Image (cartoon, rainbow, N blue to C red):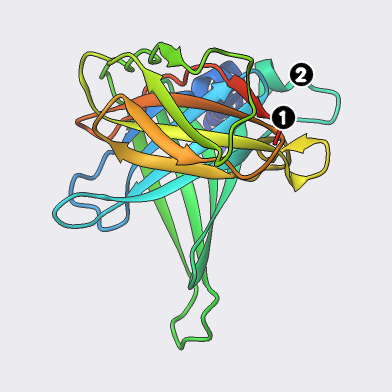
Amino acid sequence: MRKKRLVLVMVFLTVVMTATAFASLSQFSGNWKNIDPNTGGITTLNIIVSGKNVQLEAWGKCHPTDCYWGKVVAYAYAPNVSSDLVTTANTLSAIFNTNFSQTIMIIYPQMVNRIEAKVLTHFTDNSNRTDYTNVYTFTRTVSPILPAPVQVSPPNGSVFNHFPRTTRLVWRPVAGASSYTVEIDCYHCCQRDKWCTEVGRTWKIERNLTTTSYTFDFVGAQPGRWRVWAVGANGQSGAQSGWWEFRYTR
């Protein structure tokens, strides 16, 4: 009995030490694949960490290609209220909403280059379907992340006074990219004196672009900004460019 208790204590200490050793925001960063190639659920996660800010992309099993769930803000958690989040974060959470469901994802580290995601799905369409849970294990892929595209025009800080506010964004190609995604942010559009991304919202995002330019009409006489990133053939998002700002005066 005494020997058995000693073994249990050692196992407990090993788990605690392992969790502590792998606690940091950087441990979550990267592209992750489900260890079950035959899963019918979530196949891929892409976790983007910038300082204390985290974004999460997810893909679900679909045919002939996996379905993109979108990119959402993720929240990181540390052991206690006084902990340094960047160096001690040990959990992430995120919520994906559709027109018929809400999915809550809670992500924990398992070991080096492996994470576990507990997924809770709640149906919001008044159907007779039962809410359910899943647990998935992911391993970090070794595929290199594509570099951020180099933005070309309009130059950062451009001021325009033409109407209609037709704006053409241009960037240089990235080797290995199969498509590009452009995100456009708007100042005052979602909340006064705030960018939409500052309040956890997206003003405009355009995916699956196969050229290195994108043209759109901006919303008003106010500031805007844009960034772009490449997407590889495996669906992995590359590094994002910085925000380039512009402003319309009328």
Q: Is residue 207 among what the camera can see?
A: yes
Looking at the image, which residue is at 24% across and 33% down?
Answer: 210
> Vertical placement of 6 versus 243: above or below?
below
> Vertical placement of 115 versus 177: above or below?
below
Q: In which quarter of the image is the N terminus?
A: top right
> How many marks can you see?
2
Q: Which of the 4 image quarters holds residue 62? A: bottom left
For the residues labelled 2 and 1, say whether their Cβ atoms are less than 8 Å apart. Answer: yes
Q: What residue type is labelled 2?
A: Asp
176 or 103: nearer the viewer: 176
Looking at the image, which residue is at 54% across and 35% down?
Answer: 184
Q: Quadrant of the C terminus?
A: top right
144 or 128: nearer the viewer: 144
Q: Which of the 4 image quarters holds residue 194? A: top right
47 or 134: nearer the viewer: 47
State the image coordinates of residue 93 (x, y, percent, origin top left).
60, 44
Q: Which residue lies furthest to the front in this view?
A: 162
Q: Which amino acid does label 1 sit on?
A: Ala
Mark 1 element type: loop
Residue carrying label 2: 84
Q: Indicate left or right for 191 with 10 as reference.
A: right
> Vertical placement of 106 versus 121: above or below?
above
Marks 2 and 1, how far apart at CA: 7 Å
Q: Indicate left or right for 71 with 163 as reference.
A: left
Q: Which of marks 2 and 1 is nearer the N terminus?
A: 1
Looking at the image, which residue is at 43% across and 26% down?
Answer: 169
State the image coordinates of residue 81 (x, y, percent, origin top left).
84, 30
State the image coordinates of residue 105 (x, y, percent, origin top left).
53, 50
Q: Which of the 4 image quarters holds residue 216? A: top left
Residue carrying label 1: 78
